[in-house]
Image (spheres, coloured by chain):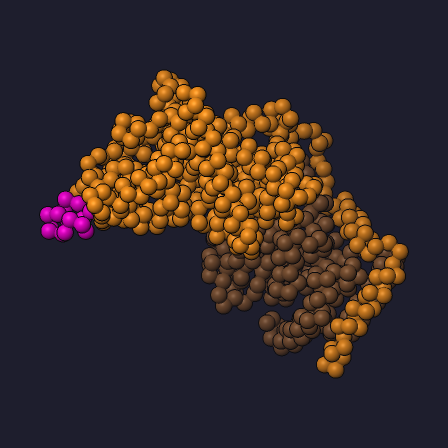
Amino acid sequence: MTTKRPLSIRKPRPPADEACGSCHMGLRQLGIDASDWDYVVALAGNPNTGKSTVFNTLTGLRQHVGNWPGKTVARAEGGFEFQGKRYKLVDLPGTYSLLSASTDEEIARDFILFGRPDCTVIVMDATVLERNLNLALQILEITERAVVCVNLMDEARRKGILIDPEALERDLGVPVVPTVARTGRGIERLIEAVAGVSAGAIRTQPHRIGAKGDAARSVDELVALIENKYPGLPNARWVAMRLLEGDKRVENAIRRGELAESSANSLNQAAAAGTTGER
Amino acid sequence: MTPTTATAPDQILDRAEQLRRGLDVSFRDQIVEAIYDDAEDIASRAVQLGRAAGPTWDEKLDKILTSRIWGLPIMLVGLAAVFWITIVGANIPSQAIASLLFSFEDAAAGLFSALGAPGWLTGFLWHGVYRGLAWVIAVMLPPMAIFFPLFTILENLGYLPRVAFNMDWLFKRVGAHGKQALTMSMGFGCNAAGVISARVIDSPRERLIAILTNNFVPCNGRFPTLIMLSVVFVAAAFPPVVASLAAAGSVVSVVLVGVVFTLAVSWLLSRTILKGEASSFTLELPPYRRPNIGQILYTSIIDRTLFVLWRAVLMAAPAGGAIWLLSNISVSGTSLTGWVSGYLDPLGHAIGLDGVILLAYIIAIPANEIVVPTMLMAYTGAGMMIEIDSLAELQQLLVGQEGWTLLTAACLMLFSLLHNPCSTTIWTMYKETGSAKWTTLGALMPLAIAFAVTFAVAQVARFLV
């Protein structure tokens, strides 16, 4: 986790046109059984982008799906198994950003920050990609273990919108997988990317928000200070940004020592990864 | 690293404070701007708008469905259509299920007697517990099995946000949150779900208003009551050709009365104990999406219909037993049902109902679903002489024997719409608000309103007629 290698751009595969028979290959849906997991995976994204549909496809569960923003109010959990590893999947409430303080945003943000998922899947609506990028960029500031799932590709095509996943992948620095979760298209590649990021086999180099001027200088200085005090903290930059904004929740977390724990954990993880290749 | 961590928090926080003060423009503004710039930049490289952006079919559809003029009327017609399909569709299976289940009751009771089981056991189990269950299934299952899939189709299609869009100005005008239209829509399925969905409203004040008023839309436990009354009383008063339309129309009117009360009570709350301005919000109109049939069947049949029915069955079994006991234990020659309903009669009469109906409401506090079955069992009483296999016989019982009038039906519909939420909803209110005070208000205010409204209607009607 300490050394970053450039993201290996995977060769585009032929799209999985043969519908669901092949797209679930190697996937074992575990329903609500999320015990003895090897990895924790979070599903985040704007409201109404199809997170619950992705969740259902992966776990085989039947989380309520509705076409209206704000439907998932609490987080749901389920499990799946892929290539011998067990994954716990957590469906987070949809949010437009992580900057304000509403209840659902706090649930989502706290889980990504303190729940330390091994991979966060950022589900995006292909028809309004630019708007969805606002949240994606914020999540990438918190965690580098992320995969972007550009969902609703069928709706985008219907509206004549063309998405270039590779360009997006280059800019965001994490794997980008186009999907149509409703039919299961692209789900297999999504699982592979999630598995790769969770196991550390795919190294990411997430986009950093391009702050300018005195803001950028303040961030840099604070990051240096935080990294000095909490070596190995994976999201020092994000913490610095929250502190500069005067975020009480993050200030309290630091006072209570949650950050120190986080830092110790990730050092242990890095040590373990050094010997076994994964944790 | 250990020696430094002791003082680390303060050192970092102090430095952050200094740096924050030193900034020209607020850090948040700078970051938000940076995020927007980056997003625009990235999107410009990754997104290509292929064809010229003319209005797509769903944009055209939205122009009509959310227009100032046509939005609300289309909504009402749609609502009426859903109820009409439910009423027409539920009638036949309802009767089939009822006769099937009740014939089984007789057979089983006969078998028990033949085996020499004591009469009280046969009565309690088969004419009490089992009959309660049979009534709940016969009255509730058919309308739910039709209404829930229709509702789920609308939900998955993306119509609910359009409803919110059409009604948001009404809620704003009464000082509530526009998204309350969404939580209200969810209340049609189940008020407890509606109360939970109020989490989409950020402001605590407006969220409380949404929670406290959710009860004023009839949930699925109460629809069967409304539908039965509309069929037995309203449809019967019209020629057969328009009977089902009239019945659907009466259910729509009740729903409209519920919406009016939602708005009026929201207004009252936001002018008195929950004062404040309506906050503005952005509502995203999602694209229409082709509903997934399997998903719809699963959600509507398993998650909704069977879930609600199972809950009703759990409540109906003890209620059936209780009613049988009340009807068959006599004190000084009159059954307990007779005593209690006689005692409640004056109060019931004052609000256009009678003592038996009030007794049924008391027994049905755990679940509104079982009001009608409980009432019918109390009416048919100890003798169990009357077998009701069809709605016509039901009407005969209620009108011929128990002296029901159109006023009774109207007052019962209103009472059913407005009275206190079921215990599950009350418990959910408590969990969501964390306050005994608000929960008590949420439970008692509707009850008081229900009594006041039915009292007024009964008195005015009796004065005029």
With respect to residue B373, does A88 lie above or below? below
Query: Position of B370 compared to A108: left or right?
Result: left
Which residue is nearer to you in this view: B255 or A200?
Answer: B255
Check the picture and name the quadrant holding the C terminus of chain A.
bottom right
Specify start and end residues of the magenta stretch as a single range: B108-123
Using the rendered view, name the quadrant where residue B355 is placed. top left
Please tell me how many numbered marks the rendered image carries.
Answer: 0
Q: Position of residue A17 (x, y in %)?
A: 54, 45
Q: Position of residue B385 (x, y in %)?
A: 19, 36
Q: Residue at x 63, y 23 (%)?
A: B69
Q: Position of residue A143 (x, y in %)?
A: 68, 62
Using the rendered view, name the quadrant where residue A269 is placed. bottom right
Q: Residue at x 41, y 20 (%)?
A: B465
Which secondary structure dominates the residues rendered in magenta? helix
Q: Is residue B122 visible?
A: yes
Using the rendered view, name the quadrant where residue B146 is placed. top left
Specify whether residue B318 is painted magenta.
no
Q: Residue at x 76, y 75 (%)?
A: B8
With respect to residue A174, does B333 lie above or below? above
Q: Residue at x 68, y 38 (%)?
A: A161
Chain identifier, orange in the render: B
